[in-house]
Amino acid sequence: METIVSMALVGAMIGASAGGWINDAYGRKKATLLADIIFALGSVVMAAAPDPYILILGRLLVGLGVGIASVTAPVYIAEASPSEIRGGLVGMNVLMITGGQFLSYLVNLAFTEVPGTWRWMLGVAGVPAVIQFALMLCMPESPRWLFMKDRKTEAISVLTKIYDVYRLEDEVEYLNSQLEEERQKKRDVRYLDVFRRKEIRLAFLAGAGLQAFQQFTGINTVMYYSPTIVQMAGFKSNQLALLLSLIVAAMNAAGSVLGIYLIDHAGRRKLALSSLAGVIVSLLILSGAFLFGSSDSTGGLSGWFAVIGLALYIAFFSPGMGPVPWTVNSEIYPEAYRGICGGMSATVNWVSNLIVAQSFLSIADALGTGPTFLILAGIAVIAFVFVSCFVPETKGLTFEEVENIWKERAWGNGSNTQSLLEQRNES
């Protein structure tokens, strides 16, 4: 079970690693179309799988598509949106993911009584990929990427659909002024530069750290295994377990809606810290429910405490640590490094996701479910400290203003950036 679940994460890890290069070389639009083709192919392979090994191959293909898309979508959205609503729009991407998870539980519940149950569950996943492929053909390329490729006429055509005439002139002038500088940087960009240049290294530490902690605090353990966790808590019926998991997924989607509002109002850093504080409490409740209850019960008091802990976990996680890592990673890197660093940080996310998914059931079996959730709570405490120390606030800042934050942190030129942040806060 762990291998079948985790093989998609292996594919996503590979897809995310290649996704940064694909984005920079061929553009955000073509990268998305490629992801859709691979995902649809993987869904067909899974549905038709004659044995577990072909099923695992299908999961690998689906993961490749997901990995490429996970790198592409936040960058594409961020580059095609004004800075004042950028966080909310990137957060909308997370809402679509969590909304999709909710729909998948709903579909699974519907197919529990249908012959060939799991084949329908897995095969129907190709439908959204086909729909997105068709709709993406009508979408424009990222204007910033077009400028970087010296396709200015196309870029301006896209920008006219985003800004009014007065703002348009400023944006075109700004992009022109940045073009030569970014080109010079681009000629010198290497993967090792991410670690050699101090300001890029600090940005990548913050971005990759957020992605790692998003997974190591257990979100996809909860989402992948919530029916199993509900059954561990004593609710033995498959349909009841799926139904309770459906409620958890619905809360995940609802929390994402709240996150879209909060991320551009409360700010990224404050939202992440508030989210992690609630996650810590929720994981302690989950741990306590399993430590002091009996998994042999048929959904007694401890079982309901476990379900409440799951629901609270989602309620705190989804508005904050759900969208914040993706939003922050879409805006903290210079243009020349955005594809590379975005791909690397997404790879960190998928590697972390793989480690957690591949080990959760085994650790729960070896140590017990209660101690496993206690370990996740401890990791959440470390994540809280990490965000406090290493993640700056980027709400409302342009890409270049964010870049100045890292230069100030790296080289100590504090007066310029500090005044910049003060001006933003006053406005």
Image: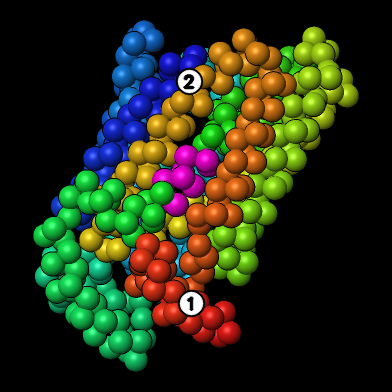
- 10 Å crowding of disc 1: few (<14), some (14-19), many (20+): some
Image location of residue 418, percent across then percent down: 48, 77
Q: Is residue 294 left or right of residue 239?
A: right
Q: Is residue 399 above or below residue 134?
A: below
Residue in the image at 25% along x and 51% along y = 196
Q: Which residues are magenta?
A: 206-214
CA distance separating discs 1 and 2: 44 Å
In the image, which disc is placed on residue 418?
1
Residue in the image at 48% along x and 82% along y = 419
Q: Quadrant of residue 145?
A: bottom left
Image location of residue 208, percent across then percent down: 41, 46
Query: In this view of the protein, which residue sits in the foreground, 196 or 344?
Result: 196
Residue 336 in view of the camera: yes
Q: Is label 2 in a helix, a strand or a loop?
A: helix
Residue positioned most to the front: 412
Residue 118 in view of the camera: no
Q: Where does label 2 land, which residue?
A: 358
Residue positioned most to the bottom: 166
Magenta region includes residue 81: no
| Amino acid under disc 1 | Gln
Q: Is residue 351 left or right of residue 344?
A: right
